[in-house]
Image (cartoon, coloured by chain):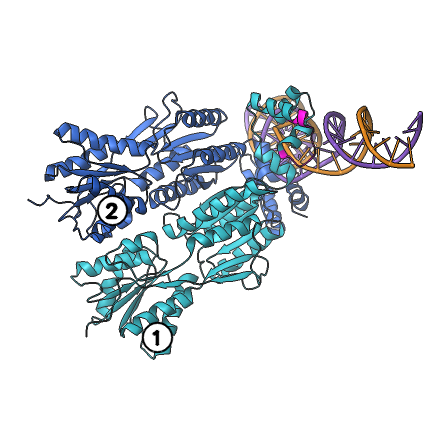
Chain colours: A blue, B cyan, C orange, D purple
Amino acid sequence: MTVTLADVAARARVSPATVSRVLNGNYPVAASTRERVLKAVEELDYVLNGPASSLAAATSDLVGVLVNDIADPFFGIMASAAQSAIGEGGSGRAGGEKLAVVCNTGGSPERELTYLTLLQRQRAAAVILMGGSLEDPEHLAATAAKLARMAEAGTRVVLCGRPPVPGDAHTAALVFDNRAGGRRLTEHLLGLGHTRIGYVAGPADRTTTRHRLEGHREALAAAGATEGPTVHGPYDRAAGHAAVAELLARDPGLTAIVAANDTVALGVCAALRERGLSIPGDVSVAGFDDLPFSVDAVPALTTVRLPLHDSGVRAGRLAMGTEDAPAHGTETVPGELVVRDSTAAPRG
Amino acid sequence: MTVTLADVAARARVSPATVSRVLNGNYPVAASTRERVLKAVEELDYVLNGPASSLAAATSDLVGVLVNDIADPFFGIMASAAQSAIGEGGSGRAGGEKLAVVCNTGGSPERELTYLTLLQRQRAAAVILMGGSLEDPEHLAATAAKLARMAEAGTRVVLCGRPPVPGDAHTAALVFDNRAGGRRLTEHLLGLGHTRIGYVAGPADRTTTRHRLEGHREALAAAGATEGPTVHGPYDRAAGHAAVAELLARDPGLTAIVAANDTVALGVCAALRERGLSIPGDVSVAGFDDLPFSVDAVPALTTVRLPLHDSGVRAGRLAMGTEDAPAHGTETVPGELVVRDSTAAPRG
DNA sequence: GCGACGATAGAAAGCGCTTTCTGTCGTGGA
DNA sequence: TCCACGACAGAAAGCGCTTTCTATCGTCGC
């Protein structure tokens, strides 16, 4: 039925071993023989059996990329970058072509674990975890344990935008400095003269949410300002939209609103507009991430730019082993404050 | 080193066969035995070896989802929907848990083929191709041939948003009615009184681009209107931004611009605004897809809504075999004209 | 001109699992 | 009471490939 290595060997009048060697190119094979084999492969339209190959070689060419929400450009951009770095990396030298696949956990710890198990089953060459994680101790421990086992079994583990596991020194981590970014953003607002700032945070139990919020509070504390109302919700437009009513109810005198990310900020802007409030005339709005659409929002969004593409590429390289891991395993990636038109001094 | 089925069998004092049967649950095993095995699995922290399992069973639980650009929400939304449908589908009955992985082709035919080969190697259970394809005959033939071989080998093939291969009757296809959508959009503009309409198309050699453009021209022809300037470019913001200068140079009297999709439309709006032109006062703008951010654009974008989420879910189900394929293999999915604020009658 | 060595090719032993094909009991029907 | 049959469990044969370990030459050095 299906063509096997043996069929190719028979047709090329060589042993299966030789065909395997030609295909893997890690053993000297005479040029004439190689040619004969390649011709047979071509003629038979032979396709290597991945499972058999992985079983015998005890390795696979799969690299898993776990993301919280693939429909969110934040993850899409990083995943895309990582995937291209991995695809290209293969052409280089040993290690060969790798198949980067992205897995959508939907932010669910169970799915995350399920995917990790599935990847572990497949003996994935590497796995990249992108984005913040849930802060549930139990889940954290389970994940850490699983990652440790995988690393032990030879799978390279890379974290991108997720804090490293405390005890573990063996997985490379690129962490976004969400705290500093959040701080800078609020400092900017404070500098503009705002004193009553509302905050639309992400889900309460996520690292990203917490760090950004902490940065915000640090800035407030440093300036001796009092904290305004805070609302938690998912990282989507609807959450931002809904939060405005709540925020304004709690403090009708708000002059600025900081959103968990750009998507949420967009929802905030829409809700503000619906209420007839102008941005930044009545209320200043700020986001986070600097997603592509943020520059086109009206007014263009003040935000904190994260090097999503670059980080994705680096994560991909780390996964391929093409790039050395940062000195202490963890590298902090800074965000850059981008001031645009959605923030201005509050009305005298 | 690593724990194998045999280790579990030894610990549970049963044969490897029994362990396998417990794990796969497709053969009667006494409750007491099962329990003993499960306990051993637990204690040993055993993880099935995927390759070995796939090799022996000649099947795998991988489902590949190929997309043109994972950083584009258009694909992200569909992929996310498909992935969740696939993840859930497993819990149901036979077929079990599947691992949906998304592969980013970047619109490159070579990468597409590479990924298909890799998936073929892995003996993927199914593969979903999302989004339009390149119209190069050679590539089309190569892809068709590869898909045919895969289908033959038992891999389910599903197309989502991509026209079916002419000769082939065995792969399910969900195709967006880009032509009708494009037609309706232009009819809307024509109805408003526009006669000088510019068009920012996608890459020239893609099915999606061609169909949308054809719809546009059909509407024009039906109304006896003359076609305005058309510019081709990638499906991104920059393309829309750049196209405006060109379009206006070719016809300074343009009163409307139709963009290949919402992302491009955003770029068009930005460029228009930079030139001091108001939307829709001076120029009406329309997009396509109705991505989440389109409703928040200012002015909110008139566009054609495609049921991306639903289609993704259906594609996922088709890939799982959970849903029956459409009657003739192909089903046309209609788009819905969504009129918002970015289009209005041209100035008297 | 002879022995040794480098360059190739083959033989064969698995890799870890699934799945027939065979048992072995225990039980219900006659 | 005996036989047939159902319910389980085990033995063993691969699945298709990789990779030692060997075997075979042709040739280089002296």
Name the residue nearer the viewer: A26 or B284. Answer: B284
Amino acid, disc 1? Leu
| Residue A300 lies in the magenta stretch | no
Disc 1 versus disc 2: distance between alpha carbons? Answer: 39 Å
Q: Residue A245: x percent and y percent?
A: 24, 45
Decide: is B153 above or below D17.
below
Res. B1 visible in picture: no
Chain that bears disc 1: B
- Mark 1 nearby-residue class (10 Å; few <14, some 14–19, many ≥20): many
The extreme front residue here reads A249
User: Label 1 belongs to which residue?
Assistant: B220
Q: Residue B298: x percent and y percent?
A: 23, 56
Query: Dot 2 lies on which element?
Result: helix
Q: Residue A313: x percent and y percent?
A: 35, 39
Q: Quadrant of residue B213?
A: bottom left
Decide: is B280 above or below B73.
below
User: Label 2 belongs to which residue?
Assistant: A268
Q: Which residues are magenta?
A: B24-34
Amino acid, disc 2? Val
